[in-house]
Image (cartoon, helix red, strand yellow):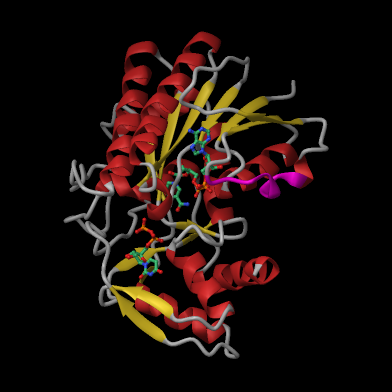
Amino acid sequence: MTKKSLITGGAGFIGSHLSRRLLDAGHEVTVMDNLFTGTKANIYDLLENPRFTFILHDVTQPFWGQFDEIYNLACPASPIHYQRNPVETIKTSFLGMMNVLELALKTKARVFHTSTSEIYGDPDVHPQPESYWGNVNTIGTRSCYDEGKRAAETLCADYYREYNVDVRMIRIFNTYGPNMHPQDGRVISNFIMQALRNKDITLYGDGLQTRSFQYVDDLVNAVLLFMALEPKKVKAFFAKQAMSVPVINVGNPGEYTIKQLAQETLRQLPECKSQLVYEALPKDDPKRRKPDIALAQALLGWTPEVPLREGLSRTIAYFRGVK
Ligand code: NAD
Ligand code: UDP
């Protein structure tokens, strides 16, 4: 039987890749999005597919539909976007998750939730395993996102334990690739767009803070593998880890300073005349971030395959087209 999948936030960067992969696998795909940061341009080519439906809707408002699985991606992800309307951001995380879980409870749908490495805040454990509880400021300018995502995890955990909703969560570490919004302010899109326009490359702080960058195809591979597992297998695996809820980190453990990222971007664009400039570090900016992916590797037999150099080159090719 054809599987029916709902993707909230499916017109965004990751959602547009997931939509394509689910359609390729034969699913009927419905994307629900309010187009806050997403755009129909990301999914134009899918609109004519008879197995694809787009619904303009805000996930904070209740909705109904019979789906086999629901992928909850709706939420602005870049700091400048999620800080633009912080109350909307935390509402989207919490109420959106609540609406997804209520629908899943009534319809017995399987749920996938996109959590984030931001739930670890500015970590004092490195690399970050799932067992780490994090170091998050509850009242800072990043908190609307971090705490919203933490509360969404709590909802997932309680619907899983109390009501047996079949929930799976991935804590996504910095993911990049084609279809990222060119002006969303995230570091990879910023550096590539600045370099393509011969503008200054803006390093925040001393540029020595680190991130671990994952190419989007690697993430989507892990999502599909996770969602394909039988609930019994999922339960047994996490019980063995003494974890009561299915949650894994997914990212590429290759760790780079932001300065190294800038240098690699410039190396791939030798014609570029941009200079590195230093600007103020945003508040609560995490100093180091790197996923421990042992659980994902053991559960899914998955490992990230696209190195930063290769992923950057594919992303630069995409941004050349939108410049
Ligand atoms: P994105 O901004 O491109 O996509 C988010 C999508 O959600 C957009 O299409 C936006 O219009 C939609 N949306 C926002 N608020 C909504 C609302 N109230 N109702 C309906 N739709 C709404 O970002 P992305 O990078 O594709 O992120 C997708 C998900 O993955 C997000 O939940 C994000 O928090 C999570 N995530 C992403 C990363 C990353 O590095 N890209 C890392 C960790 C977690
Ligand atoms: N950053 C930077 N210059 C930019 C954009 C971001 O130096 O033009 C830094 C930012 O301060 C952070 C890192 O790059 O330390 C990653 O930022 P991004 O917004 O992409 O993701 P997040 O901070 O959410 O991991």
Residue 152, can we see it? Answer: yes
Task: Tell me if residue 43 is in the magenta stretch.
Answer: yes
Position of residue 97 in the picture relative to residue 321 (left or right): left
Count the labels in the image. 0
**Residue 315 in the image, given as x and y percentages of width and height:** 60, 67
Residue 245, compared with residue 159, is above or below; it is: below
Residue at 48% over, 23% down: 231
Residue 20, compared with residue 200, is above or below; it is: above
In depth, the one of 35 and 8 nearer the eye is 35
Position of residue 79 in the picture relative to residue 194 (left or right): left
Position of residue 288 in the picture relative to residue 195 (left or right): left
Residue at 48% over, 68% down: 190
Q: Where does the magenta region start and end? A: 37-44
Residue 103, compared with residue 315, is above or below; it is: above
In depth, the one of 198 and 320 nearer the eye is 198
**Residue 298 in the image, given as x and y percentages of width and height:** 42, 45
In depth, the one of 145 and 88 nearer the eye is 88
**Residue 177 in the image, given as x and y percentages of width and height:** 57, 60
**Residue 212 in the image, given as x and y percentages of width and height:** 39, 63
Residue at 53% over, 90% down: 273
Residue at 45% over, 61% down: 185
In depth, the one of 234 and 321 nearer the eye is 321
